[in-house]
Image (cartoon, rainbow, N blue to C red):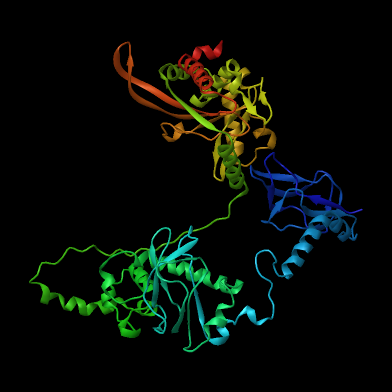
Amino acid sequence: MAEVVKMPKMSDTMTEGVIAKWHKKVGDKVSTGDLIAEVETDKATMDFESYQEGTLLYIGAEEGSTVPVDSVIAVLGAEGEDYKSALEGSSNGDTTKADSTADAGDKPESDDSEPETASSDEGVDPESVGATVIRMPLLSDTMTEGVIAEWHKKVGDEIKSDDTLADVETDKATMEVTAYAEGTLLYIGVEKGQAAKVNDVIAIVGKEGTDVQSLLKGGSKPKASEAKAEEPKAESKKEEAAVSSSADADSRVKASPLAKKIAKDKGIDLSQVKGSAEGGRIVKKDIESFSPAAKAPAAAQAPAQESKPAAPSIPQFIGEEKYTEKPVTQMRKTIGKRLSDSLFTAPHFYVTMSIDMDSAIAARAKMNEFAPVKISFNDIVIKAVAVALKQHPNLNSSWRGDKIRYNEHVNIGVAVAVDEGLLVPVVRFADGKSLSHISAEVKDFAQKAKNKKLQPADWEGSTFTISNLGMFGVDEFTAIINSPDACILAIGGIAQVPVVKNGAVVPGNVMKVTLSCDHRVVDGAQGAAFLQTLKALIEEPVRLLV
């Protein structure tokens, strides 16, 4: 009997996975334990082994596609078996939902729009009578309505393409609304000083004598196709307005806002461009067809003005705006979600303390003369934190909604940066391990993280987290708690600064650490007491050995 294979949940935070590579194809024999595919999770790329036997009858997700946890990715069964019944049985609930959604999509929306009918009250399609409805454009990302600050045309005026119809005051600035149509201004729907919501009709342009009332019966909201057409226009208007709002020498030249913007981007002097629109007005096509060679006559006129001192001018710089976009990886999605949940759910507070590192520097140098692996300052901090947590169990705890869990074991999560984001492997029972043991374990985790070989057991179960940016020259920073932990310690670099010892100012080595605490679990005095203990342990490293 055919069996479906579903996307497994490979970590505690995984909600979906990407099929990085298929190791089997339809028709291949599969045995228990065979590697079927590689799956990219939010933590790492992991091998997916089969726990079923049979012939691979169906593959439901191509390489590179994203699949939610528990969704069908393949079907195994006997060779030649009809797998469709198993596939349909597994996805019956989703299929029913999809079918109902598809059916709903074929019907007119009853909640958000009026049913379409053939009655005359619906109004006339503007295109059928050669008219254009001008609506209040979306001129900023937060705009919901605009106020007509000034009309530049009145009913009966002839309108040309690129003519400025009105000035609109938005929530951010006063911007121009351009006609983008030719004909007669038949109707003005909003008087000067009045507000109109985005997409409300503010004017109609068309053939003289067109019946405006029949057009207005169509309502104030655009149809779906019209709304889509308006989107690029609104974007162009926003770009034009950004240029037209600046007061410069080009404002004396008759040009459309879009022409001004293109000219500014290309470093073209509008005074050198000949306009082709009515009255010599410069429009987009004039800028696009302009050749820099046309500037030569202007240079020839320069000698006649030599008697006057030349006004200082800003040299033109021609640059190109460009960018690249990449899909968000599974790891980055999870980092964004988990840290947002932590920051906006757990009330954070921060405590910073400076630690004298002179003794730690001397002790580390002595330790590395005998240690089988090189011990880092980060290893010393991990050990010191683990010992301090045994004395301050409140910080080695987590918020569980209706209860607080106080952990008696100490598992230290160590943040490790990788190309795709951040992983937090866990040094378990760190309070009982030697510095050499901790150092070897952290180095092994770092190598696995870079090679994407970490397993779920490596990053689950932390009770406290450390994030160290000292190696990058960072003096101090605050970190977001790695939920469900109650605290995270941010470690800065060791800086040589003047310090006061025995009443004298002498050179010293100081490291700043900042403790982020979940105030639902830890109070300020408890966080400060923990840092005092940590400071004493690091400033006298011999205490870590007894």
**Residue 353 drawn at (x, y percent):** 44, 23
Is residue 182 visible in the rendered image? The answer is no
Q: Is residue 366 above or below residue 167?
A: above
Name the residue at 36% across, 75% down.
152
Instruction: Residue 289 in the image: state x and y as whole percent.
Output: 36, 80
Return the residue found at the far left.
307
In this rendering, position of residue 46 left or right of residue 274: right
Q: Is residue 21 visible?
A: yes
**Front residue of 177 and 446:** 177
Toward the right, the furthest residue is 1
Residue extending farthest to the bottom is 209
Picture layout, residue 390 above or below residue 257: above
Which corner quadrant of the image does residue 151 belong to? bottom left
Q: Position of residue 49 (x, y in %)?
A: 77, 45
Indicate whether 543 appears above or below 219. Answer: above
Of residue 220 and residue 241, the one placed in the foreground of this image is: 220
238 on left or right of 416: left
Task: Give the number of callouts.
Answer: 0
Residue lying at 55% horizontally and 87% vertically, measured from the top left: 129
534 lies above or below 51: above
- Give the left or right position of residue 437, taking residue 87 as reference: left
Position in image of residue 274 (x %, y %): 30, 81
Does residue 306 appear to the left or right of 129 in the view shown? left
| Residue at screen point 64% across, 44% down | 42
Nearest the viewer among 59 and 306 is: 306
Q: Quadrant of the C terminus?
A: top right
